[in-house]
Every structure is written in C-alpha cells, then in structure tokens.
Amino acid sequence: MKEALLPKPLLTIDARNEVFICQEESQFYAQCLESMVFKYCDATDTVVEFGAGDGGPVISALLKNDFNGIIHGFELNYPSYELARSNIKKYHLEDRYVVHNRCFFNDLRLEANYLIANPPYLPAPDNNLYIPSLHGGTDGADITKRLLSLGYQNVMLMISAYSNPIEVVNYAADRGYKLVDFMLSPLRFGYYSCEPKVRAAIAELRRRNQAFYSENIYFLSGVLFRKDSESDLDLSEEFIKVMTIL
Ligand SMILES: C[S@@+](CC[C@H](N)C(=O)[O-])C[C@H]1O[C@@H](n2cnc3c(N)ncnc32)[C@H](O)[C@@H]1O
C-alpha cells in the first residue's frame, strides 16, 4: 500500500456521478502533496484541505511522509465524505486527518500554514453537471480564485490549462503571492471534462485564449503559491509559458 493510491471500492458507472473518481488526477495530486507540501512541513504545521473527495490523495501522501501535523479536510458531498471517513479509519489516520462534511467557505477561516486543494475546475454556464460540486464557474477558475483570496500563507492548488490559468496566476500575484514551485502532468480528457456542455465551454474559452490543450491532452499542474516569501524566486512566467504551450 505504500506505493499505490488507495484501492477504490467496487464502483459502477453511476458511482462516477456521485463521487469524484479520476485515479490519474487524484494520484498526481497526491504526488504534488508529497513533494511540495508534506516534505517541508513539521509537526507544528497545520494544513486545511478544500474538497477532500474520498480522502485517497492525502492518505496516500501521508503514508509516504513523516509529517506528523494535522490536516483538516472539508468535503461538501456526503457520499465522498463517508468514503473518506472509512478510508481514514482503515489506515488508522484518525488523529492526523480529520474530514468535515461541510462547505469549506461556510466555516470560519481556520488558522493554518497551508491550504491545499484539487478544486473543482470544470467550466460550464451552470452547475447542472454529472456532479454539480465539480463546477468551477463559467471559466473554471472561480473556486481557485476564491481560495486564493483567503490569505493563507502557503497555498498548493491543482490548476488546469483549460480553466483560464493566466488569469489565475495574475489574480494570485495581485494578492501578493509568488509562484514558488510547480509540477506538471499531461492528462487525457476524462469522463467529467468530456460532458458535452463542459467540452463546449472549454472550446469557447480556447477561442478567447483562456484554455490551452491539444486534441489528445491538457496539462494539469500542482502549483505552490507563497505570500510574504523572503525569497525573490517567482516562477510565474515560466509556469505560464509551459501551461500555454499547447
Ligand atoms: C476535483 S474533486 C477533488 C477530490 C479529491 N481531493 C481528489 O483529488 O481526488 C473536488 C472536490 O471538492 C468538493 N467540493 C466542492 N465544493 C466544495 C465546498 N464548497 N466545500 C467543500 N468541498 C467542496 C467536491 O465535492 C469534490 O469532491
């Protein structure tokens, strides 16, 4: 189990409409957590997570790291929350990873050094989608920008090249963030991004130079933003160059 992400429960096609299921994407999010967050945290650090899903990515990253701090995850969707709770129990991580079945934004802003998320980034005119809570606004970047407006010092977010990435980076810079690290992975368009109204929204964004992809793939990136960083390092330009290459 140390190497692989959590085995998924037996799922039918319909389950994809209840719980976010994309093994490739969740696994990449876990790798980003491992390499850009947990590796550098110590026991005094606290982490909050927007959208825990089934808890798999955080559990997988925790099992490969010595991070001993606590992570508070928030998950709106009840079936996902239930899965997360049972997975946490299965791996005896109850004292390190606590998931709450609540909207992240309804809670008082929890004190934490890190905010982490693979946020909903599907662009569409409305949230009438296979899973409504995967809707990221008309350009897919609404939740991402909202998370960047909360003022956490370190924010590690997954950003898709078809969800207005240039505007996201500019938005972060306007709020005092430097882009200090990132990892990139090519992904195939999957079940959720192939829903016809999402595909149509992505094509429209491309016409406006707000979505970047090829016929076969798009880039998903894990990005670490840091506020009040003592270092001058800011990889925003390089990030935009690679994210817009397709
Ligand atoms: C792209 S999925 C990522 C799930 C998981 N982190 C993963 O990578 O496998 C985004 C998750 O955010 C949840 N979500 C959406 N809006 C939310 C909110 N306001 N508060 C908490 N969770 C939310 C969705 O239900 C969904 O499970």
Image: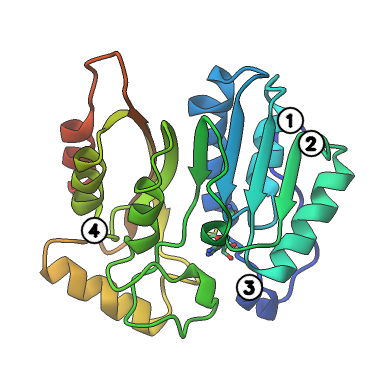
Residue ID for mark 1: 63
Q: Position of residue 153 (x, y in %)?
A: 41, 31
Q: Residues within 10 Å of mark 1 (few under 14, many from 20)?
A: some
Within the image, what quadrant is residue 71 found in?
top right
Residue ID for mark 3: 16
Residue ID for mark 2: 1
- Give the number of callouts: 4
Within the image, what quadrant is residue 43 found in?
top right
Q: Secondary structure at mark 3?
A: helix
Amino acid carrying mark 3 in the image? Arg
Amino acid carrying mark 1 in the image? Leu
Q: Position of residue 10 (x, y in %)?
A: 80, 66
Q: Position of residue 88 (x, y in %)?
A: 81, 46
Question: Compared with residue 2, is residue 16 higher up or lower down, i.e. above or below?
Answer: below
Question: Compared with residue 62, is residue 41 higher up or lower down, i.e. above or below?
Answer: above
Amino acid carrying mark 4 in the image? Asn
Q: Secondary structure at mark 2?
A: loop
